């Protein structure tokens, strides 16, 4: 009998099994090699050589699982490798990268910090840690580490892409553009760097090579390159290409669905849950809060799962007050969050993020609910098999556009955009307090500057030429964007003082107050106004829009149709220009429209949230009833 085992100490490993394990590993039979290795070393003390073999064997298994997007298996294998060699920086890096792919960014950053402490000059570790810190919103740290990685590996395009992304996140747009260009000089045509550069140019209102950029984006998207489709919504990209990009991006998200049993029909209360990181001072919260409180509690229990910051805002308090339970899942992994939802018995999970900033689609990919819906936050398809429905309406997503969506369409009979009516309309300040002339015709656009494109800008400049007393009132933008817009105005023969930038409004009430000083709101083209259009109509300010062939371009038109103002939704840019000129020359008529909007604010169809919520309730019940009957999701329109 082995004396070590007799005395309670570690035994010697079974060298024959170790030899067989090595032979299997060399043949690529990693599963059997791991089994033999664990049998050979169970209870045994490991020499550095044997421990190294075990580390490399488990790491090979982890790498194979990682390549197949089986991240749970990869993490388990890397953790076993770590047991063999607890301080190997490469293993810690692999664990950190796996946690990153699982969207466990906080845990990933902690593991990558450990790897960096062991190998401070590893560009791979610096690159991965920079990416994790970016996801956690620690942008300055992400930039610093990305710069260190670039200094160590200046010929690696990925380090320049990461640096560009960290800079863009801080609105350091000129430096971000240069970083992306540096990546493209190393790897010409790199799709992620190309998309990053074009988005940076859009945020800068840099329209140089705009047409070529549109061709490049459409080509990248149509080829199914896995770049985020959300980065393409504001450019001239076809719905077909946006669908291809969304599908490719969805395929990068590991789907490990749990097969949920079809629930029998019952008359009890269904559990619906909203998922977002925008339960704070954010447009989504400002639109949705009242609806949460109005859901029929005889039919629904309403939950909110939050993974965003607690800003102690009015909006966050209203969300908390409007739901039956508010659950913070910020610290949970995707699988942990999904399991929490399963335990809570969620019947319908409603995602409010899509692919917009800091989403967590990995949670939905784990299929925590029998019915999963995307709503409100993302105006496009997610291209994902784990999203069953999108909520829309006949104007924003008519039948002829359904081919651009993988989701079944749940159509409301009116505009699908809700509104929290608990925000009043404070009296407006004097125009000069807003930097506006006391008299004259104020054309306003408070859409983000990246939505402004040269086609619509040309129309706006023509309008300023034809309406001599008009000024263009825009939302505050980055320094680069404001400078480029003023230069574009001057190139069009418009004096710089006829373009006015409104500073950031600290609260929604501040914004609603000043918005009343505009005479007419102007919409952008490819990615139109959504919340900003709702804000305008709420204060009695009509807008002119030109809907296109994509959902993100049609929501203002939907709002106008529900408000009884379909003529403000035009069919071409010449009609758009003519409509604005008509109202500029008929200011008494425009004032009558504004008075009507204000009079119908509380009683009209656009902001009738009680009726709206009953329709939404019916849509959700229809989805759930189909699922309980074992039927697949299908497009339908709510009667009303």
Image (tube, rainbow, N blue to C red):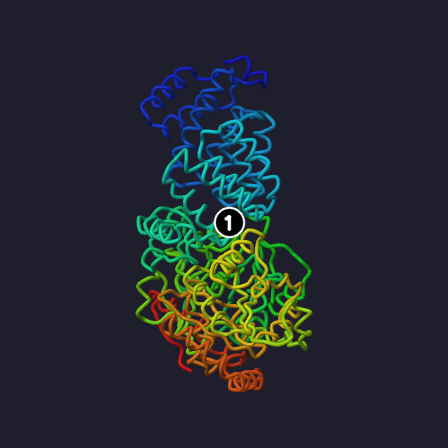
Give the image location of residue 53, x and y in percent: 45, 20
Residue 366, compared with residue 626, is above or below; it is above
Residue 211: give x, y in percent of width and height.
36, 53
Q: Nearer the viewer, residue 220 or 265?
A: 220
Query: Pointer 1: residues within 10 angstroms few (<14), some, or many (20+)?
Result: many
Which corner quadrant of the image does residue 27 belong to?
top left
Between residues 390 and 579, which one lies in front from this camera angle?
A: 579
On the image, the x and y values in percent for residue 239 come to 34, 60
Question: Residue 372 versus residue 261: which sits nearer the camera?
Answer: 372
92 up-or-down from 388: above or below: above
Q: Residue at x 51, y 49 (%)?
A: 334
Q: Is residue 480 visible?
A: yes
Query: To which quarter of the image does residue 512 belong?
Result: bottom right
Res 456 quadrant in image: bottom left
For the point 41% across and 41% down, the residue is 70
* Residue shown at 56% from the left, 29% from the top: 115
Residue assigned mark 1: 334
In percent of width and height, residue 475 lies at 57, 63
Q: Secondary structure at mark 1?
A: helix
Query: Is 380 located above or below residue 424 in the figure?
Result: above
Q: Nearer the viewer, residue 414 or 432?
A: 432
- Relative to 115, say whether 285 is above or below: below
Question: Which quarter shows the C terminus?
Answer: bottom left
């Amino acid at each position: 009998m082995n004396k070590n085992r007799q005395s309670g100490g570690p035994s010697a490993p079974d060298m024959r099994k170790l030899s067989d394990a090595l032979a299997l590993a060399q043949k690529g039979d990693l599963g059997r090699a791991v089994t033999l290795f664990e049998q050979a070393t169970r209870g045994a003390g490991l020499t550095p050589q044997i421990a190294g073999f075990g580390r490399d064997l488990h790491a090979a298994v982890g790498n194979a699982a990682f390549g197949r997007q089986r991240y749970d298996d990869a993490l388990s294998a890397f953790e076993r490798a770590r047991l063999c060699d607890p301080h190997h920086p490469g293993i810690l890096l692999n664990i950190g990268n796996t946690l990153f792919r699982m969207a466990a960014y906080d845990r990933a950053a902690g593991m990558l910090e450990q790897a960096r402490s062991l190998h401070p000059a590893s560009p791979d570790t610096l690159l991965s840690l920079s990416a994790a810190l970016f996801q956690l919103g620690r942008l300055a740290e992400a930039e610093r580490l990305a710069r260190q990685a670039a200094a160590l590996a200046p010929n690696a395009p990925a380090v320049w892409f990461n640096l560009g992304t960290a800079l863009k996140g801080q609105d350091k747009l000129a430096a971000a553009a240069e970083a992306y260009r540096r990546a493209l000089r190393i790897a010409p045509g790199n799709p992620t760097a190309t998309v990053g550069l074009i988005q940076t140019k859009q945020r800068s209102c840099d329209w140089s090579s705009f047409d070529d950029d549109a061709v490049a984006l459409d080509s990248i998207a149509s080829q199914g390159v896995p770049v985020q489709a959300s980065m393409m919504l504001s450019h001239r990209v076809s719905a077909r290409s946006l669908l291809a990009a969304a599908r490719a991006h969805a395929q990068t998200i590991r789907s490990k669905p749990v097969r949920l049993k079809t629930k029998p029909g019952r008359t009890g209360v269904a559990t619906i849950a909203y998922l977002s990181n925008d339960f704070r001072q954010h447009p989504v919260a400002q639109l949705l809060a009242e609806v949460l409180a109005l859901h029929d509690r005889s039919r629904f229990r309403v939950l909110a799962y939050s993974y965003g910051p607690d800003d102690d805002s009015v909006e966050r308090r209203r969300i908390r007050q409007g739901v039956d339970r508010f659950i913070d899942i910020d610290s949970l992994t995707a699988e942990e969050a999904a399991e929490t939802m399963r335990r809570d018995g969620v019947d319908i999970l409603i995602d409010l993020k899509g692919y917009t900033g800091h989403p967590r689609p990995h949670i939905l990919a784990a299929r925590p609910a029998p019915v999963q819906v995307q709503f409100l936050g993302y105006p496009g398809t997610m291209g994902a098999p784990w999203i069953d429905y999108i909520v829309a309406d006949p104007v924003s997503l008519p039948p002829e556009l359904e081919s651009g969506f993988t989701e079944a369409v749940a159509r409301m009979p009116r505009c699908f955009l809700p509104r929290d009516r608990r925000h009043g309309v404070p009296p407006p300040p004097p125009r000069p307090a807003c930097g506006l002339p006391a008299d004259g015709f104020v054309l306003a656009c408070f859409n983000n500057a990246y939505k402004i494109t040269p086609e619509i800008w040309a129309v706006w400049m023509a309008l300023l030429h034809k309406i001599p007393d008009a000024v263009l009132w825009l939302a505050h933008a980055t320094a680069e964007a404001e400078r480029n817009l003023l230069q574009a105005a001057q190139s069009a023969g418009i004096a710089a003082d006829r373009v006015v930038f409104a500073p950031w409004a600290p609260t929604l009430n501040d914004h609603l107050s000043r918005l009343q000083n505009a005479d007419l709101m102007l919409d952008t083209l490819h990615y139109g106004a959504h919340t900003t259009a709702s804000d305008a109509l709420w204060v009695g300010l009509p807008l002119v829009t030109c809907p296109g062939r994509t959902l993100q371009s049609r929501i203002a038109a939907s709002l106008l149709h529900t408000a009884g103002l379909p003529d403000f939704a035009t069919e071409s840019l010449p009609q758009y220009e003519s409509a604005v000129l008509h109202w500029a020359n008929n200011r008494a008529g425009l004032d009558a429209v504004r008075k009507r909007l204000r009079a119908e604010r509380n009683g009209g169809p656009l902001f009738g949230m009680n009726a709206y919520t009953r329709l939404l309730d019916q849509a959700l019940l229809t989805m759930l009833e189909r699922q309980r009957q074992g039927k697949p999701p299908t497009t339908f329109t709510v009667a009303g």
